[in-house]
């Protein structure tokens, strides 16, 4: 799976999310469901095959970039490059 994730401070997210129209919020959930993301990932901390999105911000995570493992901090500075 290849995807892009934008990570931000909780306060910034709450402000951004409050400004998002309801139709767009529904579309985001629809994409997660259509692409099957929620089959492996949870948003509430429930254990599944893939990691939960809950508590992701400001944590250290191991990712694969060009076939190599590296540890990155999941924050607004995270990048997809080496």
Image (tube, rainbow, N blue to C red):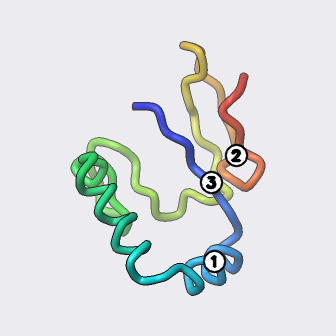
Labels 2, 1: front one: 1
Q: Which residue is mark 2?
A: 73
* Residue at 55% over, 43% down: 4
Image quadrant assignment for residue 8: bottom right
Q: Which mark is residue 72?
A: none
Q: Which mark is residue 6?
A: 3
> Residue 59: x, y in percent?
63, 53
Mark 3 residue element:
loop
Relative to 72, 62 lies left or right? left
Which quarter of the image is occupied by the N terminus?
top left
How far apart marks 3 and 2 lie (CA) works out to 12 Å
Image quadrant assignment for residue 44: bottom left
Q: Residues within 10 Å of mark 2 (few under 14, many from 20)?
A: some
In contact (CB < 8 Å): disc 1 and disc 3: no
Question: In this picture, is 64 found above or below 45?
Answer: above
* Residue at 24% over, 52% down: 34
* Residue at 40% over, 48% down: 51
- Residue located farthest toward the top when viewing the structure as drawn: 67
Which quarter of the image is occupied by the C terminus?
top right
The mark tally for this picture is 3
Image quadrant assignment for residue 42: bottom left
Q: Residues within 10 Å of mark 3 (few under 14, many from 20)?
A: few
Q: Which residue is mark 1?
A: 16
Viewer-side residue, 52 vs 13: 13
Relative to 16, 43 lies left or right? left
Dot placed on the residue nearer the N-terminal end, 3 or 2: 3
Relative to 11, 62 lies left or right? left
> Residue 47: x, y in percent?
29, 55
How far apart marks 1 and 3 lie (CA) works out to 12 Å
* Residue at 48% over, 82% down: 21
Question: In this picture, is 4 found above or below 63?
Answer: below
């Amino acid at each position: 799976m290849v995807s892009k994730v934008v990570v931000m401070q909780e306060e910034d997210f709450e402000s951004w999310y409050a400004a998002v129209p309801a139709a767009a919020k529904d579309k985001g959930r629809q994409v997660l469901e259509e692409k099957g993301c929620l089959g492996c990932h949870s948003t509430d901390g429930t254990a599944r095959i893939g990691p939960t999105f809950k508590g992701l911000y400001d944590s250290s995570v191991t990712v694969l970039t060009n076939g190599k493992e590296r540890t990155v901090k999941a924050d607004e500075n995270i990048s997809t490059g080496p």
